[in-house]
């Protein structure tokens, strides 16, 4: 037995308990990124930590790993981390270090996109608005004030990562970092100062000495040693600006974001897989899905303007963290195939062959193995051809991967993963909406509507960003107008006209509501015009301007006006004569926010101080500027929870004092763009293709993370701005209702449902089944064995099952030479 002196024993124990991770070397050449001497095919996915909760992170990251990813990519959101200058917040869902350590614990790498401009459909592109209000500042250009702040925040993040040993050079998970973001898309607007700025960004980044490569996306002139990367739906034609830079795709858009008034976007699993396979066929080294999990824009973080609270993005993991099938499963199969030939792709000699009619073959060959890609970029025609002495058929707009250049291992158009049809189950903890007992109170605005009292005043109209400093969506503009009988505009026919750039305007005259107007997505300059009756003597005009997220993209987006730029005019008409009084230069009083928000009526702690002001009698409906409150029991189980806000107008919702975001279920998507025809994956995708739910509420369901709720009683508070009816509100759980599959022979079909057992097989047929999920029917040929019985024996009562799709399982067929398929529908 070894006996150590006491001091040495203590040292030995200390080293055991405080073992240091070994540094990981990350390098690159023009073909690949090398990690600890191994050349890698790297597959990554974006998960934004503030768009989920810390309690969700292990599950999301675990599903990403199970789906075949190597890395998790995230932006760093300056505005939430430094909400006031030199005041920082990294608590709770903003705990960046905890998020990255969760990634590390899962055995994945991380890509840290510091920016600190992020775009991301996040309000103001992730910039804190106080930055805009610094004297002499100009954002995203060669401006000392801005560059000093950017360097301060970048250094803060880098030092935080170093202190926690999170860079790969310290043994941590971060293998890449990004500075700036898509600046090349807008740089020309900044002239020579833009080029000087991007050079400064590169030098500043290098000076941080992080020990891993830096990247710049959408920056074709990125200075060395920055690696320039591609963003888009397709990046197979992208070429980096240096022969020493690997071909990298930082944003493969798995779908698209949604705006208020817009339909639901959808990008097919076949097209996403096609884009990825084409990218690696053409020499890709690193590919990241934007988004892999989109999540939720909690609070007031949604940008745009007009971006919805849901940021689902049609990603492989849906907003709530469920598997978005078949997209998740189809990509998982692709990832496994790419990883299986990683050495060949990163080391092999490359031969490209143009087979004509938009068909291309690529051979990667090493002495040990050859792997072939057969790509058909024709959007309408399948291709049958002979390659290396063997006949192949590649469907239109697809890529076949042959790991041995002889047998098809994967085709992007042949989806073998299950399709999960999600349903929203009623709350089994109580009968809703009947069980919900509502109280209410009006928003107190007399000081603004009757007295015109504000916090500051000026003889001009001010920009809402400048006045509100992002403290609220709401800004009151108030002024008075004194009219005499002999005033030139005095008449019985007067109009109030307001030129607006805020997204919504509510107008009040002499304490009475006059009217409201709001913009449409993409067109945020509009004119409010309403007939008005004014009094002789003094008249008070109170205008409530409302923003729905600040501009987050475009050249000099930070200078886009918000609020009421003017003019604000009263027009008097006497016959054909029109007289205009411009009020823009009057003395205007300003007040940021609303009474109820500033007094935190949404907080559970506000009850004791103001409970007497909440009323339970005569619950009003369709009443503007009204607060509603109720209590509810959390739905049973562990499935994700949503609240149905159908019947309400527009506002914001809080659960136990935590904002679940803006709501606007009364805003229906437009009627144009949707089709009853099945979505055709073939041909180039854009965000107008394959949209759905035209004419329906843009967003009816709102995510309530389980970590926001208590096991027993919970409080829901709504601020209703437009007027609505809360009596229909109810909470539900999101789960799988039905699972379908249409798998190809020589594949293994896997069926599962979030830990629930399969209860019944509604349909199964092996051969050439027809139809789609929910309407399958038998075709002209079928296996000799009863497919339903086989599925029942293999799957019913089990949480998951695997089926070999072949004649060995289902018996011989009379289908001839066609590729046979297994169609299945099961319930839970």
Image (cartoon, helix red, strand yellow):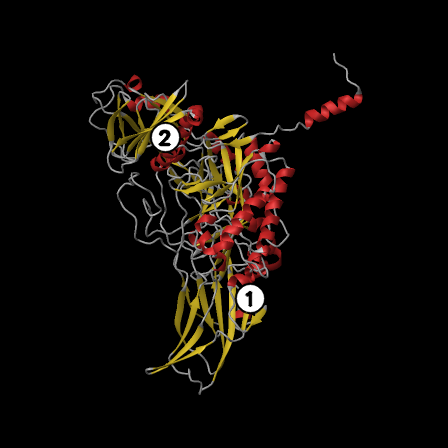
Looking at this view, is 670 or 144 the one in front?
144
Counting residues from the start of the chain, the first of labels 1 and 2 encountered is 2
Q: Secondary structure at mark 1?
A: strand
Q: How far apart are the two marked residues, 1 and 2, measured between alpha carbons?
A: 55 Å
Image position, residue 240 (x, y; %): 44, 39
Q: Is residue 209 above or below residue 580?
A: above
Looking at this view, is 129 or 58 the one in front?
129
**Residue 729: which numbered mark, if any?**
none
Near mark 2 (Cα within 10 A), the count class, few <14, some 14-19 or many ≥20, is many
Q: Could you tell me which residue is drawn at 49 percent across and 54 percent down?
A: 192
The outermost residue toward the top is 1
Residue placed under numbered mark 1 in the picture: 591
Q: Is residue 538 above or below residue 711?
A: below
Image position, residue 177 (x, y; %): 54, 40
Quadrant housing residue 10: top right
Q: Quadrant of the N terminus?
A: top right
Q: Is residue 414 above or below residue 203?
A: above
Quadrant housing residue 578: bottom left
- Res. 347 in view: yes
Looking at this view, is 585 or 216 the one in front?
216
Near mark 1 (Cα within 10 A), the count class, few <14, some 14-19 or many ≥20, is many
Image position, residue 180 (x, y; %): 52, 47
Do tag 1 and tag 2 residues touch (Cβ < 8 Å)? Answer: no
Q: Is residue 214 above or below residue 580?
A: above
Q: Quadrant of the C terminus?
A: top left
Looking at this view, is 10 or 190 the one in front?
190
Image position, residue 610 (x, y; %): 59, 59
- Res. 549 in view: no
Residue placed under numbered mark 2 in the picture: 417
Q: Could you tell me which residue is drawn at 43 percent across and 75 percent down?
A: 569
Q: Secondary structure at mark 2?
A: loop
């Amino acid at each position: 037995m070894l006996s150590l002196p006491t001091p040495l024993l203590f040292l030995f124990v200390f080293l055991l308990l405080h073992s240091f991770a070994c540094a990981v070397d990350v390098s690159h050449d023009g073909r690949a990124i090398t990690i600890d001497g191994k050349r890698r095919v790297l597959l990554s996915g974006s998960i934004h930590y503030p768009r989920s909760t810390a309690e969700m992170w292990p599950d999301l990251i675990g599903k990403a790993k199970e789906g075949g990813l190597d890395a998790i990519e995230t932006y760093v959101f300056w505005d939430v981390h430094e909400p006031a200058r030199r005041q920082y917040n990294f608590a709770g869902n903003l705990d960046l270090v905890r998020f990255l350590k969760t990634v590390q614990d899962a055995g994945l790498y991380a890509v840290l996109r510091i920016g600190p401009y992020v775009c991301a459909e996040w309000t103001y592109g992730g910039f804190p608005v106080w930055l805009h209000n610094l004297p002499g500042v100009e954002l995203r250009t060669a401006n000392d004030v801005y560059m000093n702040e950017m360097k301060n925040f970048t250094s803060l993040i880098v030092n935080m990562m170093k202190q926690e040993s999170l860079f790969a050079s310290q043994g941590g998970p971060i293998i890449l970092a990004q500075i700036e973001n898509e600046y090349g898309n807008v740089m020309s607007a900044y002239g020579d100062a833009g080029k000087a700025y991007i050079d400064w960004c590169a030098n500043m980044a290098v000076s941080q000495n992080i020990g891993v490569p830096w990247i710049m996306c959408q920056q074709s002139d990125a200075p060395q040693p920055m690696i320039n990367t591609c963003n888009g739906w397709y990046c197979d034609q992208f070429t980096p600006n240096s022969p020493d830079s690997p071909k990298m795709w930082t944003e493969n858009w798995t779908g698209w974001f949604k705006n208020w008034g817009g339909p639901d976007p959808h990008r097919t699993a076949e097209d996403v897989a096609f884009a990825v396979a084409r990218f690696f066929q053409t020499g890709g080294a690193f590919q990241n899905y934007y988004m892999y999990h989109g999540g939720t824009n909690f609070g007031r973080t949604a940008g745009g303007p007009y971006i919805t609270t849901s940021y689902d993005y049609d990603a492989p993991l849906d907003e709530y963290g469920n598997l978005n099938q078949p997209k998740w499963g189809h990509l998982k199969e692709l990832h496994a195939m790419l990883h299986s030939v990683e050495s060949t792709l990163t080391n092999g000699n490359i031969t490209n062959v143009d087979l004509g009619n938009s068909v291309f073959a690529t051979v990667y060959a090493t002495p040990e193995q050859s792997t072939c890609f057969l790509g058909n970029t024709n959007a309408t025609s399948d291709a049958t051809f002979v390659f290396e002495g063997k006949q192949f058929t590649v469907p239109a707009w697809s890529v076949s991967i042959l790991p041995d250049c002889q047998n098809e291992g994967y085709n992007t158009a042949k989806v073998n993963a299950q399709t999960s049809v999600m349903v929203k189950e009623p709350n089994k903890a109580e009968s809703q909406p009947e069980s919900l007992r509502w109280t209410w109170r009006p928003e107190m605005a007399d000081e603004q509507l009757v007295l015109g009292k504000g916090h500051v005043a000026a003889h001009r109209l001010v920009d809402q960003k400048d006045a509100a400093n992002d403290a609220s969506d709401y800004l009151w503009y108030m002024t008075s107008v004194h009219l005499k009988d002999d005033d030139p505009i005095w008449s019985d026919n007067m109009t109030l006209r307001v030129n607006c750039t805020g997204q919504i305007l509510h107008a009040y005259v002499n304490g009475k509501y006059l009217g409201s107007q709001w913009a449409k997505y993409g067109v945020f300059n509009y004119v409010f015009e309403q007939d008005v009756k004014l009094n002789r003597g003094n008249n008070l005009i109170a205008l409530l301007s409302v923003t729905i997220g600040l501009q987050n993209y475009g050249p000099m987006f930070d200078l886009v006006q918000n609020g009421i730029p003017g003019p604000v005019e009263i027009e008097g008409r006497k016959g054909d004569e029109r007289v205009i009084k411009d009020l823009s230069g009057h003395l205007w009083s300003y007040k940021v926010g609303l009474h109820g928000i500033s007094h935190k009526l949404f907080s559970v702690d506000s009850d004791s101080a103001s409970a007497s002001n909440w009323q339970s009698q005569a619950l009003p409906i369709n009443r503007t500027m009204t607060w509603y409150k109720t209590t509810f029991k959390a739905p049973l189980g562990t499935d994700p929870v949503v609240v149905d806000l159908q019947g309400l107008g527009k506002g914001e919702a809080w659960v136990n004092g935590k904002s679940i975001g803006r709501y606007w279920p009364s805003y229906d998507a437009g009627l144009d763009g949707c089709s009853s025809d099945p979505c055709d994956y073939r041909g180039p995708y854009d965000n107008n293709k394959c949209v759905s739910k035209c004419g329906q509420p843009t967003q009816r369901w709102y995510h309530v993370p389980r970590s926001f709720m208590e096991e027993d009683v919970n409080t829901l508070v709504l601020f209703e701005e437009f007027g609505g009816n809360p009596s229909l509100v109810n909470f539900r759980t999101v789960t799988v209702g039905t699972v379908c599959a249409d798998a190809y022979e020589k594949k293994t079909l896997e069926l599962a449902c979030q830990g629930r057992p399969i209860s019944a097989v509604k349909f199964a047929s092996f051969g050439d089944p027809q139809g789609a999920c929910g309407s399958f029917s038998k075709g002209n040929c079928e296996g000799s064995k009863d497919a339903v019985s086989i599925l029942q024996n293999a799957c019913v009562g089990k949480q998951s099952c695997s089926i070999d799709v072949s004649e060995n399982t289902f018996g011989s067929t009379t289908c001839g030479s066609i590729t046979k398929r297994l169609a299945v529908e099961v319930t839970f």
